[in-house]
Amino acid sequence: MKAVIIEDETAAVTSLRAMLTENQVVQVDVIAELESVEECVDWFRNNPAPDLIFMDIHLADGSAFGLFEQVDVPSPVIFTTAFDSYALQAFQVNSIDYLLKPVTTASLARALEKLRRLTSEERNSHIEHTNDSIRTRHLLKNLLITKADKFYPLPVDEVCFFYTLNEKVMAYTADGKVHPVDRTLDALGEQLDGDIFFRANRQFIIARKAIRDIDLWFGSRLSVNLQIPLPERIIISKTKTPVFKRWIAAEQ
């Protein structure tokens, strides 16, 4: 069985490769390791379909779901993710399985066994349903904010940026208000419109409309300045800089 690993963490790729080599369910030959949506799109447009894809949801240049919006993904998918079971409920797609990180030998064997038992017809149905369900997922339009003994709706188009610190996520709006958000930044990254919001780094998701200007920063990085005060500087890594430049230059 030929497999592709889509993952941007080197340690995770190394660990998964080792477990695949040692697994007793089915022989797996890893033919490609891809770490960005851009790299995935290019690979799938120019190579025969593998028998299986291991796909992390979060990649260096954004959500792996973006791959499904640009090409037909012609293979069964096993998602790997750091989300807990509660967060996964927001991203139900018809995948073979979810492997929560860190991936274990037992969970990998279970997923491979599920795949092995599928008939050809069932595999084709899985592939079709996965592509359709991801492409038609609903983007987040409003957040329900709970504060003290009250709650209220917050339209996401009013948010300038989302910021996380000590596992708490806050939404900052142009009026200077700060709103507690009961979702992780990873979860928000999957639910927000990628044309409007950009995952700058582990601390920030920023809105296009809130960007004032951008400074060149040390080590081929960028520093993004917004129209409202920030709790800390927003740095775009060297790896993400080309992706960010294309995003900010794209016509809306």
Image: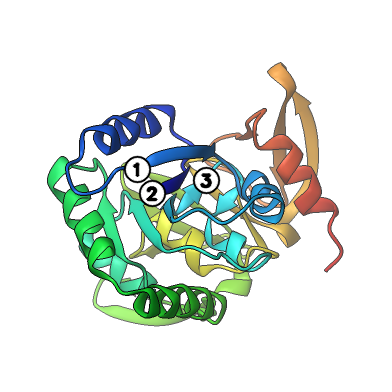
| Residue 129 locus on image (x, y percent) | 45, 80
- Dot label at residue 130: none
Closest to the observer, 222 or 85: 85
Query: Can see residue 178?
Result: no
The residue under label 3 is 59
177 w.r.t. 125: above or below: above
Q: In the image, residue 117 lies at what x, y percent?
A: 23, 67
| Viewer can see residue 97 | yes
The answer to whether mark 3 and mark 1 are in CB contact below 8 A is no
Q: Earlier in the sequence, mark 3 or mark 1?
A: 1
- The residue that appears at 53% across and 47% down in the rendered structure is 204
Q: Residue furthest left?
A: 106
User: Is 86 drawn above or below residue 3 in the view shown?
Assistant: below
Q: CB under 8 Å between callouts 2 and 1?
A: yes
Q: CA distance from mark 3 to mark 1?
A: 23 Å
Q: Residue 143, located in which quarter of the rendered image?
A: bottom left
Residue type at mark 2 is Met
Q: Amino acid at mark 1?
A: Val
Q: Which mark is residue 1?
A: 2
Give the number of the disc on residue 28.
Answer: 1
User: Badge 3: how crowded within 10 Å, few (<14), some, or many (20+)?
Assistant: some
**Comparing marks 3 and 1, which lies closer to the viewer?**
1
Q: CA distance from mark 3 to mark 2?
A: 24 Å
Residue farthest top in this picture = 219
Mark 2 vs mark 1, CA separation in Å: 5 Å
What residue do we see at 35% from left, 78% from top? 122
Q: Is residue 85 left or right of residue 243?
A: left
SS state under label 3 = strand
